[in-house]
């Protein structure tokens, strides 16, 4: 018989965050034009999670996303992607980090009109001088339902299809984190639901990490968690949201009327 005591169960460590803000402040202008856009924000974006950021206009949502994505500098505190602290990185390293570790989806799609859907999707790889991983490319293209449209140019695609190209482009490099800024803002509700479904699938089934800014409680309900900003501060958060619980929380926080609620 073994004399060794059974090892005590070790709790599984929390997975490291894909991105993290700590005491992050961002001030624009000075003197009379000074605006505190972010006021000591601390928030983590868990790996393999879908987080929505909500809050009224001017509450700092875009600023937080831009600071976390290395598109804007921080005034104080820290913004990290994985283990990398963004402040203090040279422009070259910041550009490389954005290229390799961050995917973007914008409200206005931002596709190149002269390139086909496939060329748009693989553009981040072409810029990085990387060959596409065929299997992953196929997964991404199939996930967003574009297999039959890869030779089309953006003008030959509907808004929903263009945004699906943009989602595929954001995923193609298997980034550490995808930031989506009002990705359904220009779409009808059916196309919007498709795009949100693909973002959620990329998190649940493909293990990606997505952070999405939205005004829409229905869109936020696709996320695992909602972080609420008010006047540049994190004022609340909600887990496993539904459109109703988000709407209710928005009313409690007095964060204004949502654009759509149904
Ligand atoms: P949201 O995305 O929630 O609408 P923003 O992050 O765009 O909010 O803005 C937060 C605050 O910072 C607002 O008061 C806005 O006017 C201000 N702000 C944002 N960008 C700039 C900038 N480039 N220069 C000056 N003020 C800015």
Image (cartoon, rainbow, N blue to C red):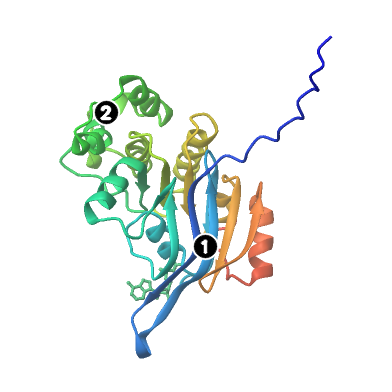
Residue 9 spot, x, y in % from top left: 75, 30
Q: Which residue is at 45% across, 41% downward?
A: 195
45 versus 58 height, above or below: above
Q: Quadrant of residue 117?
A: top left
183 versus 117 height, above or below: below
30 versus 64 height, above or below: below
Residue 137 spot, x, y in % from top left: 33, 26
Q: Residue furthest left?
A: 114
Q: Quadrant of the C terminus?
A: bottom right
Q: Which residue is at 66% across, 46% downward?
A: 240
Where does ligand 1 appear, by image quarter? bottom left
- Find disc 2 in the rendering and name its residue: 150
Residue 232 spot, x, y in % from top left: 50, 71
**Circle 2: element type:** loop
Q: Residue furthest right?
A: 1
Q: Residue furthest top?
A: 1
- Find disc 1 in the rendering and name its residue: 259
Q: Would you call the spot at circle 1 few (<14 residues within 10 Å), some (14-19), or many (20 or more)?
A: few
> Is any atom of residue 33 visible in this view?
yes
Q: Relative to 138, is 241 on the left or the right?
A: right
Q: Which residue is at 77% across, 30% downward?
A: 8
Q: How far apart are labels 1 and 2 at the CA level?
A: 33 Å
């Amino acid at each position: 018989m073994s004399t060794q005591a059974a090892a005590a169960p070790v709790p599984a460590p929390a997975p490291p965050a894909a991105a993290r803000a700590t005491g992050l402040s961002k001030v624009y202008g000075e003197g009379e034009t000074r605006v505190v856009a972010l006021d000591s924000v601390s928030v983590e974006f868990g790996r393999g999670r879908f987080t929505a950021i909500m809050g009224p206009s001017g509450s700092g949502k875009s600023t937080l996303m831009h600071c976390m994505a290395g598109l804007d500098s921080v005034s104080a505190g820290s913004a990290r992607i994985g283990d990398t602290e963004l402040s203090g990185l040279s422009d070259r390293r910041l550009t490389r980090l954005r290229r390799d570790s961050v995917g973007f989806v914008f409200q206005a799609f931002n596709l190149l009109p002269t390139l086909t859907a496939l060329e748009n999707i693989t553009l981040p790889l072409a810029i990085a001088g990387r060959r596409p991983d065929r299997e992953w490319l196929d997964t991404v293209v199939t996930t967003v339902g574009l297999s039959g449209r890869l030779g089309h140019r953006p003008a030959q695609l509907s808004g929903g299809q263009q945004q699906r190209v943009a989602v595929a482009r954001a995923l193609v490099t298997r980034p550490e984190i995808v930031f989506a800024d009002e990705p359904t803002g220009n779409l009808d509700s059916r196309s919007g639901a498709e795009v949100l479904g693909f973002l959620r699938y990329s998190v649940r089934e493909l293990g990606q990490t997505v952070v999405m800014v939205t005004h829409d409680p229905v869109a936020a309900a696709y996320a695992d968690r909602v972080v609420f900003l008010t006047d540049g501060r994190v004022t609340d958060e909600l887990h496993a949201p539904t459109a109703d619980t988000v709407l209710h929380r928005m009313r409690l926080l007095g964060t204004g009327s949502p654009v759509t609620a149904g």
